Image: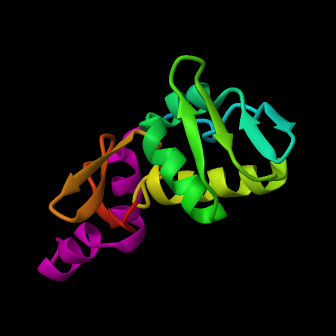
Amino acid sequence: MSTNKDVAKLLYDYDYLLKRLYERLPAKGTKASRFELPKLIVERVGNKTIIRNFKQITDVMRRDPRIVMRYLLRELGASGNYDEENGMLTINVKVSTATLNNLLQRFVKTYVICPTCGAPDTRLEKRGKTWVLVCEACGAEQPVPPL
């Protein structure tokens, strides 16, 4: 004959509850591959640096080229222009490929990758004077530094 204490112990046994929890969890899906940008195609002409595949890079990030251009130029303290016809960015200063890669990785970490779930499926929205990173995968919203 079982008592109430025995039933409660059986129902609330830690190992039993843990096992039950793991049985009810959904199967682990394959983890998305790490977000990677295409390799930069950089050309230096005189004192200018030209990123030949700038449009391709911004397409992978799903960001407006003008926003990425504004970020890069501000971080470099330089001027430049974006050629929509050819998809190239011209920066009016010599910049190393390593520096450009570091800046683009910082941009991706801050303005592309969701800080909550790590997915690159995000979009930038401007709400008043604030920029907000909205994740389409998990629904999280995160204010980001102004662009």
| Magenta-drawn segment | 1-28
Compare residues 24 and 125 and report the one nearer the observer.
125
Instruction: Name the residue nearer the viewer: 38 or 115.
Output: 38
- Image height check: is 113 above or below 75? above
Q: Main secondary structure of the magenta part?
A: helix
Query: Residue 122: x, y in percent?
Result: 37, 43
**Farthest residue toward the top?**
85
Q: Is residue 143 visible?
A: yes
Q: Quadrant of residue 15?
A: bottom left
Q: Residue at x 40, y 39 (%)?
A: 121
Against 130, residue 45 (above or below) is above
Task: Tell me if 58 is positioned left or right of 17 in this view.
Answer: right
The image's colour scheme reads: rainbow
Q: Quadrant of residue 18?
A: bottom left
Q: Residue at x 28, y 58 (%)?
A: 132
Depth check, front residue: 113 or 28 = 113
Answer with the quarter of the image where residue 6 lies: bottom left
Q: Is residue 114 left or right of residue 139?
A: right
Considering every residue shown, the one lying at the far front of the view is 46
Q: Does any portion of residue 30 appear in the rendered image? A: no
Q: Is residue 131 left or right of residue 31?
A: left
Residue lying at 19% horizontally and 71% vertically, measured from the top left: 7
Q: Residue 66: image x %, image y %?
A: 45, 41
Residue 22 belongs to the span the image colors magenta: yes
- Judging depth in this view, the residue of 40 and 48 nearest the camera is 48
Looking at the rendered image, the quarter that the N terminus falls into is bottom left
In magenta stretch: residue 71: no
Q: Position of residue 138 (x, y in %)?
A: 30, 47
